[in-house]
Amino acid sequence: MDNKIIAKSLKFISKNFNLTKNIYISFFGGEPLLFPKSIKYFIERSKTFLPNQKLLFTMTTNGTIFNNEIFSLLKDNKINFQISLDGDKTFQDILRTTKSGQGSYDAIFKNLEQFKKITKNISFRSTITPKNLCLSKIYNHFKILGAKSVHFEIISTSSSNPLYFNNQNIEKYKIELNKLANIYYIDFLKETHPINIRNFTRFFKPIHFGIKRYKSCGIFNNFIAIDFKGSIYPCQRFVGMKNFKLGEISQDFDINKSQHMIKNVNKHPSCKKCFARYLCGGGCYNNSLYTSDPKKLFSSPHCQIYRHTTSLAIWLYANLIQSKKKNPFIEFMQSSNFL
């Protein structure tokens, strides 16, 4: 994104979200740290265009690039970042190779200590495929690396892709989730501040307070993505999909006109019979595109896994909330602002 598009993007945000108190801006790629000067310019200009809003910057990086310029960029601007890492060296080097065909793990591991100088709260995000299903092994490796937060997400792809989750792989993944939940339960009993496994912990607050989600996220409502040309999409996962282009930053735009495109969870035929619907909110809208028949969404890989993860989160909560004089789970909930 060049400086002209950056300025136009900020002008667009200022015009359309001028009443929003907190604005979250996420730099997404590709690899955003290939363009530190553009990110720095965006942040500097945002203070001019959005002087009355609280700005919070986030980023997902593959962790392979690091230098003094990047160190200053992340630290000085308090950018909250997570590192994309698909497991230990074996898994990562199989799934994430460089342009030259080399594995990428060593480069990430080399930079990790520098990232830790910026924040103690190192967060990892793993894309799970049939080739790296061993969640407990990945989790234990992340503990060794000093992670404070982790999230696992299965790959979003069509059924023609060899990495697509068929029924056999879904069942294997459920078994791995069971193992992970049991290990996490034990870790909670032993540790005051265990790693935050977002797959489970994101449900604790809505379970505790009975909060219902009627939509899964803010797309078509208070969330947009702007690509390097200035085109607007519902979120970063739709960028480049012409059918989901919402407009241009140089044109008038009304996000309310797009809200009809996503259904309330109570109106979706597949969600009506699901016990997890108010914790899920209907699931990722982009993921649902990989199910050709909306009526079959209930049996899609993402829905099956989401339901299973939700049931494990309920099990974890029910067992961990049992009060003791010193309950690590209660301390975790309080320190994470869940209570």
Image (spheres, rainbow, N blue to C red):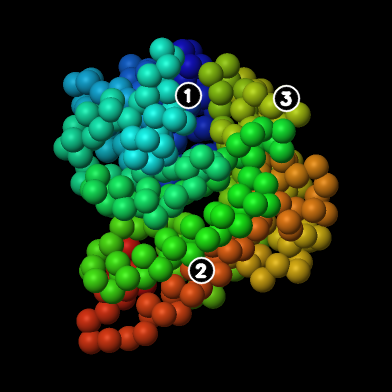
Question: Where is residue 187 drawn, in percent x and y?
Answer: 30, 67
Residue at the disc numbered 1? 30
**Disc 3 from disc 2: Cα separation:** 38 Å
Residues packed near mark 2 inside 10 Å, few (<14), some (14 to 19) or many (20 plus): many
Between label 3 and label 2, give the one nearer the viewer: 2
- Front position in the image: 216 or 199: 199
Between label 1 and label 2, give the one nearer the viewer: 2
> For residue 61, what is the image quadrant?
top left
Q: Is residue 131 left or right of residue 295?
A: left
Whether residue 84 can be seen here? no
Question: Where is residue 53 drawn, in percent x and y?
Answer: 40, 42
Q: How many marks?
A: 3
Whether residue 316 can be seen here? yes
Secondary structure category for the residue under label 1 = loop
Q: Which is more N-terminal, label 1 or label 3?
A: 1
Residue at the disc numbered 2? 312
- Front position in the image: 215 or 53: 215
Task: Name the kind of residue labelled 3 in the image.
Answer: Lys
Q: Which is more N-terminal, label 2 or label 3?
A: 3
Q: Are marks 1 and 2 in contact (CB under 8 Å)?
A: no
Q: Residue at x 42, y 61 (%)?
A: 180
Report the disc number at residue 164.
none
Residues packed near mark 1 inside 10 Å, few (<14), some (14 to 19) or many (20 plus): few
Question: Where is residue 203 drawn, in percent x and y?
Answer: 49, 65
Residue at the disc numbered 3? 242
Name the image quarter holding the C terminus. Answer: bottom left
Q: Residue at x 72, y 33 (%)?
A: 160
**Disc 3 from disc 1: Cα separation:** 19 Å
